């Protein structure tokens, strides 16, 4: 007979997340011929298109920072946020059959998706920095600890958004159709292809409400020694991230039983 092995809740949670991660990776990459290469191809294509356009216009974004690196500092985190937003909307519907297992809750599926997107984001950022450096496209590195801090805050922000959209997407299924329309305008006001100091100061008050803008500005400040995000606000990013995470947890906590019952 096999021994009766008792697992504590943390071990059960760990095994659930591990199994969901494997399932998500197979679902996301297994059906594509390019497979895991798409992790690098998506941000790389964004960078090449934007860098080509602005190179033809003869524009240099920031002294001491090559255009491709400047773009990478904005595109990589924005793709991560966009994916977390979209995946959160469909988290319940696409995993509905799994909720028959009492160990698994909608929170687990959302957390797994955010963990996977965040791992993809960090891997693609590092890999593309190395590839560009191999081709001679480099800039002096600045602050590793700042990058760690803002990415922890960014993870909390993305998790809070995904939890909120998980509930909204289940309560209002039509939101899934409008999700891309909600995210797309953010692409143009989040500093993906501009620095806030290049924008006329009278518009700063409006743009500075966007936490993603501060995230991208601080990411570039952490990556590049010559970049000075004078208008980026770390306390505002921290307050926004923690507030969004708390809101997402409260909304999920109040609705999670309905999410399970809705199947």
Image (cartoon, helix red, strand yellow):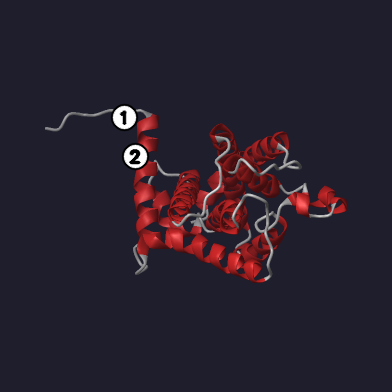
Q: Residues within 10 Å of mark 1 (few under 14, many from 20)?
A: few
Residue 128: % across, % down: 47, 54
Are dots 1 and 2 in contact, CB under 8 Å? Answer: yes
**C-alpha distance separating marks 1 and 2:** 10 Å
Circle on res. 82: none
Residue 59: % across, % down: 69, 63
Q: Quadrant of residue 5?
A: top left
Q: Nearer the viewer, residue 198 or 138?
A: 138
Asked whether residue 142 is in view, the answer is yes
Q: Is residue 120 placed above or below 180 in the rendered structure?
A: above
Residue 241: % across, % down: 65, 39
Q: Nearer the viewer, residue 130 or 189?
A: 130
Decide which of tag 1 and tag 2 comes sooner along the chain.
1
| Disc 1 secondary structure class | loop
Asked whether residue 253 is in view, the answer is no
**Residue situated furthest right in the rendering:** 202
Q: Residue at x 43, y 53 (%)?
A: 134
| Disc 2 secondary structure class | helix
Q: Residue at x 57, y 49 (%)?
A: 162
For mark 2, what is the residue?
15
Q: Nearer the viewer, mark 1 or mark 2?
A: 2
For mark 1, what is the residue?
7
Residue 2: % across, % down: 15, 32
Q: Residue at x 39, y 37 (%)?
A: 13
């Amino acid at each position: 007979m096999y021994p009766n092995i008792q697992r504590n809740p943390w071990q059960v949670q760990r095994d659930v997340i591990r199994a969901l991660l494997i399932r998500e990776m197979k679902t996301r990459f297994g059906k594509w011929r390019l497979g895991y290469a798409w992790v690098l191809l998506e941000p790389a294509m964004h960078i090449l298109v934007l860098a080509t356009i602005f190179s033809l216009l003869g524009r240099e974004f920031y002294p001491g920072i090559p255009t491709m690196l400047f773009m990478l500092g904005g595109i990589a985190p924005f793709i991560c946020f966009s994916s977390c937003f979209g995946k959160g909307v469909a988290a319940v519907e696409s995993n509905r059959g799994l909720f028959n297992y009492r160990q698994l809750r909608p929170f687990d599926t959302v957390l797994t998706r955010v963990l996977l997107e965040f791992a993809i984001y960090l891997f693609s950022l590092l890999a593309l920095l190395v590839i560009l450096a191999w081709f001679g496209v480099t800039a002096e590195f600045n602050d590793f600890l700042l990058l760690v801090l803002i990415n922890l805050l960014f993870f909390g922000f993305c998790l809070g958004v995904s939890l909120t959209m998980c509930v909204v997407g289940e309560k209002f299924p039509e939101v899934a159709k409008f999700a891309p329309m909600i995210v797309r305008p953010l692409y143009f006001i989040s500093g993906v292809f501009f620095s806030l100091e290049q924008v006329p100061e009278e518009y700063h008050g409006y743009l500075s409400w966007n936490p993603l803008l501060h995230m991208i500005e601080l990411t570039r400040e952490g990556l590049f020694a010559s970049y000075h995000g004078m208008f980026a606000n770390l306390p505002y990013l921290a307050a926004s991230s923690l507030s969004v995470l708390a809101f997402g947890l409260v909304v999920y906590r109040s609705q999670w039983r309905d999410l399970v019952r809705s199947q």
